[in-house]
Every structure is written in structure tokens, then in C-alpha cells.
Amino acid sequence: MENRNDYSRYITDNRKFSVKTIRSLQVLQHGWRLFLSCWKPMAGYSLLVWAAVLTVLSPFTSWALNRLVARSGELVVGNTELITWLLSPEGLLSLTLWGVLAMLGIVLQATGLIWIAGNQTRENVFIAGRTLHRLVSTLPQLLRFCLGAFLLCTVSLLPLAAGLGGVYLLFWGAHDINYYLTVRPAEWRWALICGGSWLLLWTCAAGAVLLRWLYAFPLWLEGVRPFRSTLRLSWQATRQSFPSLLRNLGVCLACVILVRLLLEGGLFATFGLIVRQLENAVTALFFTISVYLVTGAALEAVFSFIGIAWVVCILVTCYHADRPAALPPAPAPEAPSRNQPRQRPPRPALRYGVVALALGIVLAASIGVSLFLLKRKPPDKVPVVIAHRAGALHAPENSLAALQIAIRQRADYAEIDVQRTRDGQVVVIHDADLMRMARDPRRIRETDYAHLTKIDIGRMFHPDFAGERVARLSDFLQRAAGHIKLMIELKYYGSDPGLAEETIRLVRRAGMEGQVAVMSLDLTGVRQSQRLSPAIPAGYLSAVGLGNLARLDLDFLAVSTGVVSSALLADADRQGLRVYVWTVNNADAMLDMMELGVDGLITDDSAMAIEVIRSVQELLPVERLLLRFRHFWDLFAEQETAAEKKADRPRN
């Protein structure tokens, strides 16, 4: 009897599983048929929203943010000042404005597609314009909806920020962050475990809550007000259907991603085979590459649209199945069945014409791209080589030994970091303490220079450098004079208003005004050094920020590889600013930066940078053009320099 009960329970469980599977497949099938029936107005509406965002929403957002940044009295707010500024009235207003306008673009896209799918507007492309007009006419209500959604997202981020901040203070608060990132002690691993667990927990919770509130979009379209009522009704409607909603949307996204990966992989392999047969025909090669780029971009756009639209159709299908009973009845969207006769006879000529038009657009775009690539000349700039931290790859960073190697390698600059000790000496060291360099927890600003001279900063790097000590800026100036220029970064760990003044005094005393440049993450320190000595080039070191960097009245910018762009370089060139990029430590990245046209490479490996620059200068213009596409096919591996191959090998 017990075995029979177990068998019956097994059959019942499997039957439930089968029913759930069949229902999920039916929902997916219904959503797909619904998409096929109204994809034309959906596509037209998506194009209209994209055009509106590109021509109106994005420029207005950029203009408004720049105006708010300018109200703070600075053209740029970045790095350490960014957090302080974000907590100011202007910063909070800017953050809210950016969030609401970004949310507006998402809401316009989602609500329009939901309205088209829910109202069964099939085969009529012109309904897209009426849909956008209908939503824009309710702009004040849309903005209130977006404001509520943004504030809700902001509040939901507070537990995440508090948890990660607590993990940081608990495990990484004792020493300089670079010690944990480089040495990776036990505290580093515990922080990753705890922080990752908290992030995973928050992501699951936030994702579940977001899914329970997805019906807020169609509820708002049905006239449910205010915003909190849509959330409450959505939460009630998904109480029983949450697992099936999660499963249906997950399967839909997985299918789209899988098909997309297969098609993109097939496209890449196909064009790769074609290109390998055209290595001696440059014009045909560039045309083929252009066809690949245009086709890939078109596939990217098409599959992004299909994925979003199919998800919307499934959401609409599930919503009408779970629609709150308190609302008046509304007709559910009916996707045409497979055997349903079409209302209009098929028009093969029109379809063939549409296909021919699409192919013609791809062909014309490919020809245009290939002509642009062939006529575009590589930048003529020869970037200067700047040894990061005096050359941190071959010797202890910011040491006199590293400076000597940078001189031998013929780097143009040695970039060094300076800060002051407790007794006012300007020393050359990057971190706030010596944990990473010598496992010594003493902070530089709380230690006299006489004590620092007793600490060995070379042995941990390599026994050959045992006995290397923290050097003063005056020592670097004396050693570098006539051999290499110095790019001095002012490091501010807390407040030190006298750092810039003392640095400039030492430079003047050494007679090195024409052989140094000064920069900092702190714009106030840069301005101070600029006032003290206008003859010394001053630059802003930017990791992240708001505003137009190129409008700063400085001599140069030092930006991360994530910040640099063609637009920034063009603006900086018009303003007469040089742009240096940090930290570029492999040949591939160096080639990318050279193709952009940067003025300098800040790198730990000066020898590699010099070799890459020399090799590129020896290439013909056509070969330099081919270098732009070295990431695509093995054909371009022949154009790589010996230095790049060396960089790809693991270092001990």
C-alpha cells in the first residue's frame, strides 16, 4: 500500500509538472503569435521612441546636467568631489533629473509596446505615431510615474549601499585600498564573500519585487492612479502567478539570447572564412569588413527589438490572465491562431520589395562605411611615453631605482606621486600607508621622514632591490635633471593645503620649471599650483566625473581608458589641451589609444610602449588601417608587433 501511495504521488507530481510545462509553452506560443500579429506597429513605435530619445531627450538631459554642474561654480565635478557634490542641492537635483529622464525613455518604450499589444493594433504601421502622441499628451502624468519609479529604485538601493559600505569598513577600512587589491590578504577574500553574498541576496530580492510590480505598466495605461495603487494591485495580481511569470519570461529571454548567439557566431565564422581569402585585395577586404559591421549592427538592433517585444507580448498575455478582479473587464488580446485565415491576401511582390529594400540599405551602408574607412587617415600624433609611478613593472614603484630604469628605457616622462610627512617633507609614494610596499601600517602623513628612511620598500618587490628607501621629491628632481621630465601627481589623503605650495617651491629651487608638469585628482590643488607657477603645465587627473573636461582652463588632461573618447579628444584638441591616458599596460590597448589619437600613454612598461610606437610608425597607411580590425580575424595577427606578442605572455 505504501509503495502504491508513493507511486500515485509520483504520478501526481509529474502530472503537475507536465501541466505547468504545457501552460508555459502555451503562454510562450500565444505571446509569439501576438508578436507576429503586431510587430509592424511595434517596430515603427520603437523607431519613433529611439529618434525622440536621440534628438530630444538625450540632448536636453546633457544640457540640463551641464547647467546644474555649472551652478556649482566649476565646469567639471569629479573624483573625490563627486560624492560631496551629489549630496548638495544641485547634485541631488541633477541625480533626480537624470534618473527621471532616463526612466522616461524606458517608460515610453515599455508602455507604448504594451498599449499596442494589449489593444490588438495589427498590421497598421501608422498606429505607432498615434501611440506616441497619446503617451506624450499625458507627459505630466508620465513624469509623475517616472518620479515615483525613480524614488522607489533609489530607496531600494539604500540597503545595498549600506551593506557594501559596512563590508568595506569592516574588512578594508584599516589600510590603503591598494594593499587589499594587490596583496589580496584574507580580509580581501572575506570581503568578496560577504559583499558578493549580500549583492546576490539583494539582487534576488530586488528582482522578485520588480517582477511582482511589472503589472504597474498596464495598470497605469488602464487609468489606475496614483502610482502606489498600481504597485499594490500588481502585487496582489502576481501573488499566485509569480513562479509562472518568472518561468515564462526567463525561458523567453533564454531563447532570444541563444538564437542571437548562434546567429552572431555563424555570421562571424562566415565572414572570417571570406576575409581569409581576400588578404591581398585591400578594397574587397574593406568592403567585406564593412558588410560585416553593418550586418552585425542590423542583427543587434533586430534581435534587441524582438527580445523586448516578445517579452512585452508575454507580459500582456500573463497580465490579462491575472488581471485584478476589482477592475472593470477588458478584452484580452487574442493572437491569431495558426489556422486562422488572413484578412488580406498575401502580396509576394510587396514582400520581395521590402527584402530588396533592406538588402539595398545594407549594401549602401556597407559601401559608405568602406569608403569612410579607406579615406580616413590614421592619426599623425606620436604619443609621449610616461612611466607610471616611475616604471612600476621593472622596479619598486616611485623609487629612484625605477626612475633610473625609466631613464635607460628613454621614457619621455616619469609620473610620480607626492604627499607630505608629518614633519612637512614632500616624499614620493602613492599609498596612504606602507602596507603594500613593506607591510608597515604606519600612515605617511602621521610619520616623520626620519622613520620612513628606515623602512625597506624594495625587498618585497625583489631581493635585488633590497635596501631601497622612500625618496624625497628633491632627490627625484636632482636625479631626473637633464635626463627625463617628471609628471608630479599631488596626492591628497585628507586636507593638505600646503602640498602644492611646497612642491612648487622644491621645483623652483631645483631649477626644473621647464622639466616638470603637475596634476592631481583634486581640482583645487591643480588650481593652486597653476596660480603659484603659471609656467609649469598643470593637468587634471580624471577617473570619473560630470561636465565637459575639455572646457577646463588647463594644459592637459590625464584620463582613464574608460573615460577617453573620440569626442573628448576632438573637444580637447580644439581647446589646445593634451590628453594622456592611464594606465595602458598591454600592446593591444596601446594600439587602440594610438588609433584614437591620444597625446601620451601612461604605462608601467615604457619599453613596450616605445617598441609599439616604433613598430606602428614603420607600417604603411594601409597596414595601419588593417590594425583597426585586428580583433576580428586571425588575418590581422600578422600585423601585431613583437612587443604585443610579448605582452600576451604571462609574467612571473
Image (cartoon, rainbow, N blue to C red):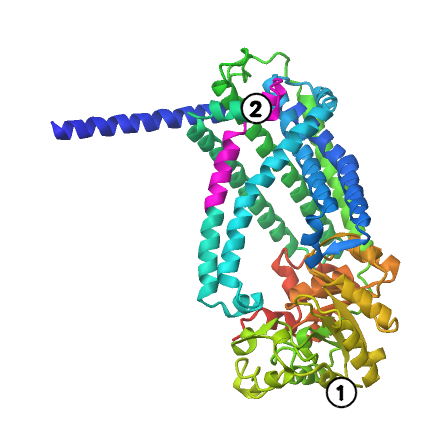
Residue 620 appears in the picture as rendered: no
Residue 7 appears in the picture as rendered: yes
Inspect the magenta stretch and tell me whether residue 206 lies in it. yes
Q: Quadrant of residue 631?
A: bottom right
SS class, disc 1: helix
Give the residue at mark 1.
Answer: 478
SS class, disc 2: helix
Inspect the magenta stretch and tell me whether residue 498 lies in it. no
- On-image quarter of the N terminus: top left
Give the residue at mark 2.
Answer: 230
Disc 1 crowd, CA 10 A, few/some/many (<14, 14-19, 20+): few
- The residue located at (69%, 53%) in the rendering is 84
The residue furthest left is: 1
Percent position of residue 225, x then y: 62, 20
- The residue located at (74%, 73%) in the rendering is 499
Eyeballing the image, is 525 above or below 23?
Answer: below
Eyeballing the image, is 20 above or below 600?
Answer: above
Count up the numbered dots.
Answer: 2
- The residue located at (47%, 58%) in the rendering is 192
Disc 2 crowd, CA 10 A, few/some/many (<14, 14-19, 20+): many
Amino acid type at image mark 1: Gln
Eyeballing the image, is 231 above or below 538?
Answer: above
Tell me the magenta residue range: 201-230
Question: Residues under labels 2 and 1: Cα distance?
Answer: 71 Å
Percent position of residue 441, x then y: 53, 74
Answer with left or right where residue 259 lies relative to residue 572.
Answer: left
Q: Quadrant of residue 126?
A: top right
Amino acid type at image mark 2: Thr
Percent position of residue 83, x then y: 67, 53
Nearer to us in this view, 604 or 338: 604
